[in-house]
Image: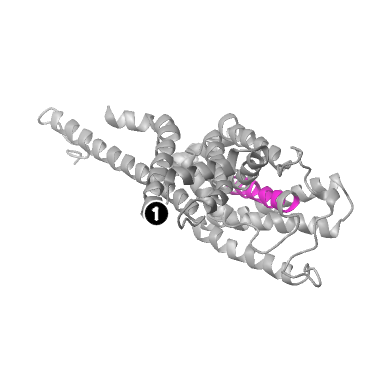
Amino acid sequence: MITSWLTRSRGIVFAIVVPIGAVVLSLITTAGILLIVGSDPIEAYGNMFDAAFSSPYAISGTLEKSVPRLLPALGIAIAIRAGLWNIGAEGQIYLGAIAATGVTIWFPGLGALGIILAILAAIFAGGLWGAIPGVLKAKKGINEVITSLMLVYIAVLLASYLISGPWSTPGATFPATDPVPSGERLPIIWSNTLLNAGFLIAVAGIGLAWLIVSRTTLGLRLRAIGGNIKASSMAGISVGRTIVIAMVISGAFSGITGAIEILGVRGRLIEGFSPGYGFEAIAIALLGGLNPLGIAAVSLLFGALDAGAAGLQTTGGDVPSSIVQVTEALAVMYVMIALGARTILIRRHRAREALAERLEAPAGEPEPGEGST
C-alpha cells in the first residue's frame, strides 16, 4: 500500500510540495549563510523583493529575465518525459541566436517579416542542433548527454568566431555584431518597461508544451518511451523516430530563446549573451516537476532572484550578488535529495512486499521456475 501511495503521489507531492519545500529550505539555508557573513537576511530578502517587484519597471525586469529560463526548461522537460537528457540546451540557444542574427545581417530592412524569418530560422537551427544527439541516440545508441554537451562548446566557439570574425563590427570596443535594425527588434508590449513580445512567445510556449505532452499522440508516445522503452517498442511505437522528434522539439524551444535574446533583449550578438540559461533550465525543469505550469512558476522565481540580485548590493555587510546562484543550487540539491529518498523508499517497500508474498505462499507450492524439469 505504501509503495502504491508513493508511486501515485508523484503527480501531487513531487509537482507541488517538493519544489515549494525545496525553495523554502534553500531560502532558510541562504539566510543562515547571510547571518554568518554578518548580514540581516530579512533586510536582504526585502531588498531583493523590492528590486524584483516594487515597480512596473522592476516587475517587467523579472518577467523578462524569466523568459530565457522558461522556454529551454519546457523543451528539456519534454525530452526528459521521453527518458532523454538534453544537456545541450545552452548550445541550442546559441545556434538560435546565430541563426536569428544571420537573418538580420543577410536580409536587412524586412521589418516584421524579418522578425518572423529570424524566429523561424532560430527554431530550425535549435531543432537541428537537438536532432544531432537524437539521431545518434536512435541510430547508434550513443549517450545523448555526452553528444548534446559537446555540441554546446561547438556552438559557443562558432558564435565567438562569427562575432570576432566575419560578423564583427569594425572599430567596436568589444567583439559584437552590428546592432539589429530597430524595425527588426521585438516590440515592447508594456510601455516604459523592458518587457518585449518575447514574453508572449514564452506564454504561448507554456500552452504548446502542455498540448504536446497532454493532448497529443506524440505526448503519449513520449511518456510510454520514458516509462519503458522495451515495452514501447513491443507495442509498435517507433522508438527511434520518437526520440529524434523529442530532441528536435526540445532544441527548438531553446533555439527560439536565442532569437528572443538577440531581437528583444541584447539587440546584437555578443559573447556570453547567455550566462548559462540552458544549464539553469535543467534545474528549473526538475524543480517544476516537468509540468509546464510548475516550470513557469519556477522560472518566474528564478527570474525574480536574478532581478533581485541587484538589491543585495544595498544590504549591509558583505553580500555578493552570487548568493542568488547559491540559493538556486540549494533548491536543486534539495529536490534531488527528495527524489533520491523517494526512490529508496519505493525500492525498500517493494522488497518487503515481495518477501511478505513469498512467506505467505502455501507450503509446498513451487516457486516460479521450480519443478519444470
Q: Residue at x 67, y 35 (%)?
A: 204
Q: How far across and how far down the image is residue 200, in percent?
A: 70, 37
Q: How far across and how far down the image is residue 167, in percent?
A: 78, 67
Q: How far across and how far down the image is residue 11, in percent?
A: 43, 31
Q: Quadrant of the C terminus?
A: top left
Query: Is residue 11 part of the magenta span, yes or no?
Result: no
Q: Can you identify the residue that label 1 sits on?
A: 38
- Specify whether residue 134 is in view: no
Indicate whether 291 appears above or below 105.
Answer: above
Query: 30 or 247: which is nearer to us?
Result: 30
Q: Is residue 20 left or right of residue 77?
A: left
Rendered image quadrant of residue 218: top right
Q: Quadrant of the N terminus?
A: top left
- Residue type at mark 1 is Gly
Q: Is residue 266 left or right of residue 41?
A: right
Query: Is residue 262 part of the magenta span, yes or no?
Result: yes
Q: How many marks?
A: 1
Q: Please report the bounds of the magenta region as a residue range.
A: 245-263
- Specify whether residue 372 is in view: yes
Magenta segment, principal secondary structure?
helix
Element at badge 1?
A: loop
Query: 361 or 88: which is nearer to us?
Result: 88
User: What colouring method underlies this structural image?
Assistant: one colour
